[in-house]
Image (tube, rainbow, N blue to C red):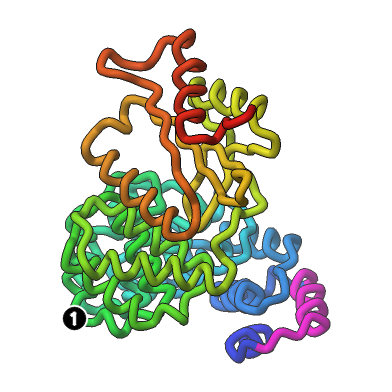
Amino acid sequence: MTAWAFGKAGVDHPELFRALSNSALQRIEEFSPQGLSNLVWAFATVAWSAPEPLCYAVAKVAFSRISEFNEHDLAMTAWAFAKTGVSHPKLFHGLAAASFLKMGNFSEQDLANIAWAFAKAGVSHPELFRALSTTALQRIGEFSSQGLSNLAWAFATTAWSVPQPVFHAVAKEALPRICEFNQLGLTMTAWAFAKVGVSHPELFKALSITALQRIDEFSSQGLSNLAWASVQADLIPTRESDQLLEAIAVRARQQNWSVLKPEFGPPSPSAVEARCAELVQQWIHGSTRNRYFMGFELDIVFEADDGTLINLEIDEPYHGAPKQSAIDGRRDSFLNRCGVHVVRFPAFDESGPLREDCEEPAFRALLRNRRLLSGK
């Protein structure tokens, strides 16, 4: 109870939690199911990182006694392990199996938490999400604003096919309560709907208006996710969405957030992109590839002579499709507002991808025409 009380109060006391961890490890077999879930929840809640030996000990005992856990203990244990980042697929599959038998007794918060936990932990379990989908639809009106955003985010994050009825039910429930959503809930909901490609103009309009009114509350990551969602959503741009993207760009510049992130993305599997990147690195000193800027990955990036950030995008045939072309246009417009100049190289023509022997001359001509290779 001591660990739970400190966790509930949000009091982070490393020395105390270290002592509690050592003591709990010695007596882990004595804990009840509720005690086990409370223990790992407490360690997951405080800022001090949960010790892996304790988490693995809890997982071992919890798995062996999983049938004794009630629905709240199941959800809380799953949430805690996902929050700590300690991977234990065997425990999660045990939690899923036990949850099937008690799904009808889950509170809306427990439903949202266990969905969030499996998505956060990266544990794929289609049968569980199918059951969660059915149960959540029946009780969608009971969900809090946080529960709605967690539910949408969880279904968007898992590899399981998108349950369209759940998203439309979330949208219907969220619309009249949009002012109840905090900045994280707004961001998660927008991201989730854009990620799965569920178009809902009324919801995005409401999200845009509310986010615009509270733009100063958002973190750099929150603004990046909002921008990505506004660009990615398969919707005709509106006055509200345009105003939101402009406000995000202004806020990002004010806070000096509109800069390249230090980390690199994974290399693209695209052979043509790799060839073009190699050419640019030969021609332009300091050019790099697969960098992140305000939530968007840039194929190739470098600074022009005047300090302007240049993003070269290597477009393959699918970029010619109307939907992708519209997304590209919204993306490039937003990046331009943030001070990034985007240049696109269409590595294809009417007959398909360019032949390799045509790529370099066409690419060089494009860069010279844009005065990016002047004097080189």
In percent of width and height, residue 335 lies at: 44, 54
- Drawn side of residue 323 relative to residue 345, left or right: left
Which residue in the structure is indicated by mark 1? 176
Q: Quadrant of residue 152?
A: bottom left
**How many tags in the picture?**
1
In percent of width and height, residue 178 lies at: 26, 79
- Identify the residue at horizontal 80%, vertical 77% (top origin): 18
- Identify the residue at horizontal 30%, vertical 50% (top origin): 196
Indicate whether residue 21 is drawn in magenta.
Answer: yes
Q: Amino acid at mark 1?
A: Pro
Residue 106 in view, yes or no: yes
- Drawn side of residue 291 relative to residue 134, left or right: right
Q: Secondary structure at mark 1?
A: helix
Vertical comparison of 223 with 308: above or below: below
Q: Magenta residues? A: 11-26
- Drawn side of residue 80 relative to residue 24, left or right: left
- Identify the residue at horizontal 27%, vertical 76% (top origin): 209
- Identify the residue at horizontal 33%, vertical 64% (top origin): 190
Vertical comparison of 240 with 130: above or below: below
